[in-house]
Image (cartoon, rainbow, N blue to C red):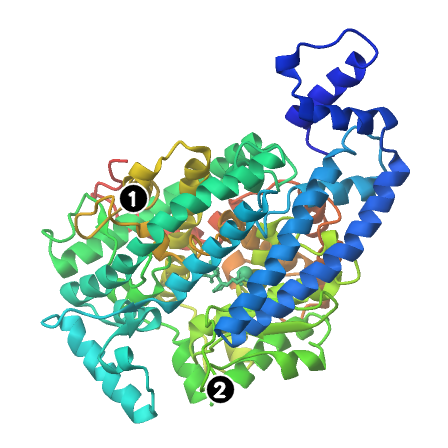
Amino acid sequence: MLRALPPLLIPLTALSLAACGPKPAPEKTPVKETAKVEVKIKGPTAEEAKAFVAEADAELRRLFVASSEAEWEKNTNITDETEAAAAKANEALMEYLGGAIKKATTFADLELDPETARQLHLLRVTASPPPAPADAAARAELASIGAKMEGIYGKGLHCPPKASKLAKVGAKLAKEKKAKGVTDEQELAGCMRLGELEDVLAESRDYELQLEAWRGWHGLAREIRPHYVRFVELANAGAKEIQYADLGELWRAGYDMSPADFEKESERLWQQVKPLYEQLHCYVRAELSDKYGADKVAADGLIPAHLLGNMWAQEWANIYPEVTPYAKAKSIDVTKALKKGGYDELKMVKLGESFFTSLGLDPLPATFWERSMFQKPEGREVVCHASAWDVTFSDDLRIKMCIKINSEDLITIHHELGHNYYFHYYFKLPILFQNGANDGFHEAIGDALALSVTPAYLKQIGLIDAVTSDEKALINLQMQDALEKVAFLPFGKLIDQWRWDVFSGAITPDRYNAAWWELRQKYQGLAPPEARSEEDFDPGAKYHIPANVPYTRYFLARILQFQFHKALCAASGHEGPLHECSIYGSKEAGAKLQKMLELGASKPWPEALEVVTGSREMDAGPLLEYFEPLQGWLEKENEGRSCGWSE
Ligand code: D0Z
Ligand code: ZN
């Protein structure tokens, strides 16, 4: 189960032999390792390994809880004090983890019971927090760079140049803020936050204005670059100390296969879905070319990255009005229905919970409702980026969101509750098993259930009046879905493609930005809307880069959620096309899901997958099946167009 550990143990074995034989050549055996020889001669035993795992469980529990308590505080009330407290708790956790991981490697050669071996393995692949160097100064520097980068991102405020179109938007917002009693001087001067710049991209279809919003946010990321360069050095040093080639290799080690095999596996999944993405890209490009003109969007070229309704062009649902297949046929507007139905934040979360309980899963604990944050509070700074928590790792479930009454946030609520239900069904396990089967599983649960938010379901709960079942309405609906789900796939893949290469050194700092756009071109078929240089640091404009959150999990989740959906649909007795299925109310589906959640990370992920789907392989087949109607339509629609782009 444990990964073979070359550098540390091989010299040890050589030395333990050497201890009773001829002295090995001094240059091959630095003096430092002599101490470890004694460890090997005494030899750790299986009992010691077991005792160590029990001790680590207690210690990790204490440190993880302290860290997430401090993190929750910071996230719901950003001050210098809460930031310092969180940094301190994280450093203590990192320090312990570093030592514990090194100790875990000393048990590598032993025959261990599967539970102990699995926990030691999971300890060794812990990616969050990232492994820190043992050197206290380096560790402190790593922690402070992390906080610094997150701070720059979180505080990001763009002040539009005077004569710009964006300055008018900023001025209008400033007026509204003044009326609301906002006191921040810069904001009152028309400077804009990320959320406001995102709104411009979501709502405006003015080429220039969108460009100004895009440029404004991406300009702010330049400041992150020097910190990121240093971060990579320190994080890699930490990874090397625990015998990984670099941090990327550690990230790829968390999938119950070799890092090299995982790289192939994720590429295989991408190749499965690429043809569908190319069809979507081709259609959207043609529509945008019509709209903005071939001089702005070339009919056979790359799409400028600021025209897709989203700051990162990661999900394109906001441009649905521009690319609606059948303008006269029915489109479902969940946002409108929510507003009409008198939904507020609480009612939306209750609706999310009711989906889970309809499957026979437990209601959320009372403390969830007392401790969660659903709304942006007045009078203090909070992190609005949605998140899900079990603060004490003992069913202390919470979500933190600044909920907006719209369909996107209804889906996000399902997403976050999916995390909470995973937490709920595994909180009694050892702390190292309190995780998803792999991190893609954790990200896929809520999304899988949200796939059951079909027109028929919306009608059943009274959100919409009627379900139209003609072909045109179906294609409209599938287009809305694809702009969310399919458009995301290459983005979900390329973020870590870039980081893997950065961590390995294949991309050096002098090529950070150029390499980023090469990948944006290769995977997404996008181009920067204006010239870039190595002064820019466009990857840093995406939260997960400065926050150092691995991203492949979201790519995997987009694929896994359709596998789960298909299997749960079968369990619910659904017959007919996959896109029509809703598992709402199915106790059979719920029971299957619960069985998988209860495993946590205690077993390699193929076993967990088998519990729900009967298969041990990740597979994009169900995603392709779900989008069959749209794929056929797109192929017809794109006839005569030359699809694709030069990679
Ligand atoms: C605070 C984690 C979850 C448990 C992990 C267990 C957590 C936050 C993150 C937030 C979101 C914000 C929008 C939805 C998720 C995020 C990505 C990708 C994405 C996903 C779905 C979607 C659109 C985009 C993005 C999350 N708990 N191992 N994380 N999503 O760390 O302890 O709360 O970033 O529809 O680019 O927006 O996964 O929930 S914690
Ligand atoms: Zn998530």
Q: Is residue 606 in sight in this rendering?
A: no
The residue indicated by pointer 1 is: 513
Tell me where residue 505 appears, x and y as whole percent: 42, 33
Quadrant location, the C terminus: top left
Is the residue indicated by label 2 positioned so its CB lies within 8 Å of ligand 1? no
Q: Residue furthest right?
A: 47
What residue do we see at 58% from left, 67% from top? 85
Tell me where residue 504 appears, x and y as whole percent: 46, 33
The residue indicated by pointer 2 is: 343
Question: The residue tagged with tag 1: helix, strand or loop?
Answer: helix
Q: Amino acid at mark 2?
A: Tyr
Tell me where residue 641 appears, x and y as whole percent: 21, 44
Is the residue indicated by label 1 positioned so its CB lies within 8 Å of ligand 1? no
Q: Nearer the viewer, residue 383 or 606?
A: 383
What residue do we see at 71% from left, 56% from top? 434
Whichever of labels 1 and 2 marks the residue nearer the N terminus, that label is: 2
Quadrant in which residue 319 is drawn: bottom left
**Mark 2 closeness class: few <14, some 14–19, many ≥20 residues within 10 Å:** some
Q: Quadrant of ligand 2?
A: bottom right
Q: Are marks 1 and 2 in contact (CB under 8 Å)?
A: no
What residue do we see at 75% from left, 42% from top? 120
Q: Nearer the viewer, mark 1 or mark 2?
A: 1
Quadrant in which residue 566 is drawn: bottom right
**Mark 1 closeness class: few <14, some 14–19, many ≥20 residues within 10 Å:** many
Q: Nearer the viewer, residue 178 or 306?
A: 178
